[in-house]
Image: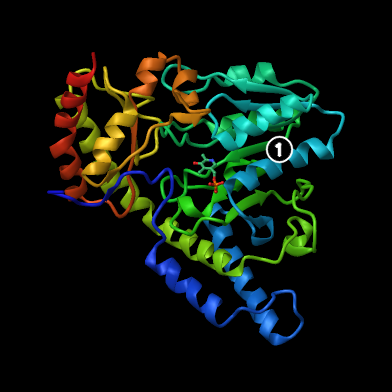
Amino acid sequence: MHDKRFCYFDNNATTQVAPEVVEAMLPVLTEHWGNPSSAYEFGTRVAELIEGARTKAAALINAEPREVVFTSCGTESNNTALSSALRLSPHKRHVITTAVEHSANIKFGRHLIQQGYDVTFLPVESDGSIDIHLLEQALKPETAIVSAMFANNETGVIFPIEEMAAICRYKGVPFHTDAVQTPGKLKLDVKALDIDFLSLSGHKLHAPKGIGLLYVRSGSRLQPYIIGGGQERGRRGGTENVPYMVGFGRAAELAMNSIADENIRVRALRDRLEDTILKTIPGAARNGSRVDRLCNTSNISFPNVEAEAVLKKLDQIGVCASSGSACTTGSLDPSHVLMAMGMSPARALGSVRFSLGIYNTDTDVDHLLAHLPRIITELQAETP
Ligand SMILES: *Cc1c(COP(=O)(O)O)cnc(C)c1O
C-alpha cells in the first residue's frame, strides 16, 4: 500500500494513552501493588496514591476531592446517577434526558421504560441545539432526575448546561451531566455550573479504558450501584483500580494544560479540514451548529455515498474516522443523533465524523485532504 500513514481522527471514540500517563501508572503496577484498605504501610502508601489521584481529578472540574467517586467507565457513572435517583425516591418514576445522548443513557432510558418508568427524551433542533423551554415544560412533580450531555460525541454540539441545571435547581430536581467529551476542550467548573452529578471517562482524556469518574456534589445523596466493601466512602464497592486511578489523575493534569492547544492549534486543524472539505467536495454539508461546538469535532454528510464505504476506503489509506451508524441485527441503522436533528436516513447514513486530538498534525490533515475528494467521487460513480 503506497502512501500508508496512520492518521487517527477518531478521538471521540477513544484516545491514545499519553506516555506521561503510562509513566505514572507503571510504578503502581510493579511496586505499589498493595491493597489500599490494608492497615500496614505497604497498603496505606497505596491509599495515599489514590488520594493524590482524586485531588488531581477533582481539580480538573473544580470539585472537592471528597466529591469524586472513581468508577469503571463513563457508562457506569451515568447509570449510577440515574439509578441512584430512582432508588432514593421510589415514588418518583419520571426521568428526563435528551434524544441525542450516548447509548449509555439512551439504552438505559429504554430499559427504564421496560421497567415501567416514564422517560422523556427531549428533542433537538436541526442544528443539534436544545430549546430549554422544553425542559421547563417536561418537568413534573414525579421527575426524579434530569440527565443531559454537556457536549455531543457525534456532532460536538454543546448544550447550555448551566441554564438547564438552574431550571432543575429551581424546581428542586437533581441534575446530572455526561461531560465525557469535554476534558481538555472546555473549562469545567462544577461549582459555577451548580450541578449535582457529572460523569467523565478516562479513555476519552488520554487515560486507559476501564476507569471513570462520577462527581457527587457534597450534600447530594448517592445510592451505590456496586454494593460491596466500603471503598470510595461507601459509594462504590470493589477493591480500587489503583493504577488506573493514578493514570486518570495524571491525565486530568494534562487535560488542564492542553486546553489552550486544543482550542487554538487543534481547532485550526479541524477548521482547515472542514472548510477545505466543504469547499472542494460538491454537496458536502456540516451536521450540527458551527459555533456552539467542541473545537475538535467535525461531522460531515456526503451526498450519494454510504459512510461505511467511505470509512473502508479511508482505512485503506490509514485514516481512522467513524460514522454514528449502529449495527443492529445485521442491518445498519442511521445515527439516532442525526435522525433526532431531523435528517433523512440517507443523509444520516452518508455522514462521517472526524474527531481530532492533541496528537494530530498538519501532515495528518494534508494526508486526508489529498485523498478524500477522490474517494468520494469514486464511490459516487459506483452508486447507481
Ligand atoms: C464514550 C462516551 C461514554 C461512555 O464512556 P465509557 O467509558 O466508554 O463507558 C458516555 N458518554 C459519552 C458522551 C461518550 O462519548
For the rendered model, the colour scheme is rainbow
| Residue behind mark 1 | 82
Confirm if mark 1 falls within 8 A of ligand 1. Answer: no
Judge left or right: residue 156 versus residue 228: left
State the residue lying farthest toward the right: 91
Horizontal arrangement in the rendering, residue 368 relative to residue 145 (left or right): left
Give coordinates of residue 51: x percent, y percent.
63, 69
Q: At x 47% / y 59%, what residue is drawn?
A: 207
- Asked whether the viewer can see residue 271, the reply is no
Tell which of 366 and 165 is nearer to you.
366
Q: Is residue 278 left or right of residue 211?
A: left
Q: Quadrant of the C terminus?
A: top left
| Residue 298 occupies quadrant | top left
Q: Is residue 2 above or below residue 113?
A: below
Residue 181: x and y in percent read 47, 43
177 vs 255, left or right, is: right
Write the residue at 18% across / 48% down.
362
Q: Residues within 10 Å of mark 1 (few under 14, many from 20)?
A: many
Residue 343 point in image, percent of width and height: 41, 15
136 in relation to 374, above or below: above
What amino acid type is highlighted by mark number 1? Leu
Q: Position of residue 335 (x, y in %)?
A: 45, 26
Residue 94 visible from this viewpoint: yes
Examine the image and state in which quarter residue 33 appears.
Answer: bottom right
Q: Secondary structure at mark 1?
A: helix
- Residue 286 or 4: which is nearer the viewer? 4
Q: How many marks?
A: 1
Residue drawn at x 73%, y 29% as measured from the top left? 112
Residue 360 sits above or below residue 18 on the image: above
Which residue sits furthest bottom? Answer: 41
Is 271 situated above or below 139?
A: below
